[in-house]
């Protein structure tokens, strides 16, 4: 399985980039990019409108590819603003999917529990798309990860109940944060762990410093 796939690339990143701007309010993404000391900006967009449009545009693709390309368009839209000179903008989006369903942020604790319980004994995918954008450069790609939960057994119930009750899962796509999970839930992970958290840091660093250094 190829874990990083290209979506769109135009132009070349200048070597005199002075500012890194993260287009996200996510504290997890901010922490992952702390080594770049990014400024934070937000460009509110209608993610569901973009999702509906491009899921239709890419309807002939298999479901995973269709979702991944749509995820890229959402990331692009987040940095579609007036760009400052000498600045690199980083925007991203993360989607959790299982079979042919997209799991967004749960609206209720009951929905969160249903999502969470559906992972046991199955593989689900997490896709994080990234858009690197400057005045002279556009680079859009996505990173995939596969997560397998263990087969369910009854002694896991207290762990599930505790997680649903105590963790702030309502703001997390798919009703979980991989960094918060009890190790007994996970059978294996394929791909970049940070993709599941919300930003494939090693790939971003390679693309930036492979160009401007």
Image (cartoon, helix red, strand yellow):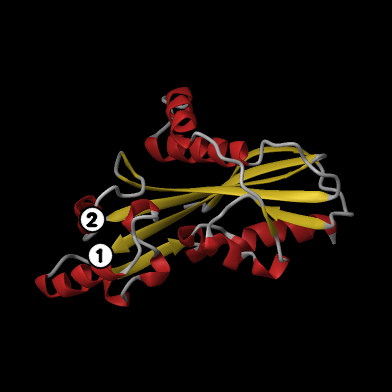
- Residue 29 in picture, x, y percent from top left: 56, 60
Image label count: 2
Q: Mark number for residue 24?
A: none
Q: CB atoms at circles 1 and 2 under 8 Å apart?
A: yes
In the image: residue 53, left or right of residue 19? left
Mark 1: secondary structure: helix
The residues tagged by marks 1 and 2 sit, at their Cα atoms, a distance apart of 7 Å
What mark, if any, has residue 164 been given in the picture? 1
Instruction: Name the residue nearer the viewer: 167 or 117.
Output: 167
For image coordinates 43% across by 33% down, the residue present is: 48
Q: Residue 213 location, x and y as percent?
A: 85, 62
First-in-chain label (1 vs 2): 2
Question: Is 154 situated left or right of 133 in this image?
Answer: left
Picture residue at 82% right of the left edge, 39% below the top = 136
Q: Secondary structure at mark 2?
A: helix
> What residue did someone put label 2 on?
109
Q: Residue 7 in the image: x percent, y percent?
A: 61, 39
The percent position of residue 19, horizontal first and vertical second, equals: 79, 56
Q: Residue at point 45% right, 59% down?
A: 196
- Which of these two is toward me, 174 or 60? 174
Residue 32 vertical position relative to residue 174 in the rendered view, above or below:
below
Would you identify the image quadrant in which residue 164 lies? bottom left
């Amino acid at each position: 399985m190829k874990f990083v796939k290209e979506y769109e690339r135009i132009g070349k990143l200048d070597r005199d980039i002075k500012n890194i701007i993260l287009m996200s309010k996510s504290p997890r993404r901010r922490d992952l990019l702390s080594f770049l000391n990014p400024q934070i900006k937000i460009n509110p967009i209608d993610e569901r409108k973009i999702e509906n449009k491009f899921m239709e545009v890419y309807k002939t693709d298999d479901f995973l590819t269709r979702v991944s390309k749509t995820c890229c368009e959402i990331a692009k839209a987040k940095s579609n603003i007036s760009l400052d000179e000498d600045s690199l903008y980083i925007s991203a989006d993360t989607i959790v999917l299982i079979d042919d369903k997209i799991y967004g942020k749960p609206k209720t604790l009951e929905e969160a529990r249903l999502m969470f319980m559906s992972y046991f004994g199955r593989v689900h995918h997490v896709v994080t798309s990234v858009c690197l954008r400057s005045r002279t450069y556009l680079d859009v790609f996505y990173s995939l990860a596969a997560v397998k939960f263990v087969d369910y057994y009854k002694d896991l119930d207290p762990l599930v109940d505790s997680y649903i009750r105590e963790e702030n899962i309502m703001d997390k796509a798919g009703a979980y944060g991989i960094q918060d999970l009890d190790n007994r839930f996970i059978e294996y992970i394929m791909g970049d762990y940070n993709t599941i958290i919300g930003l494939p840091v090693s790939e971003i660093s390679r693309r930036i410093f492979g160009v401007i250094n």
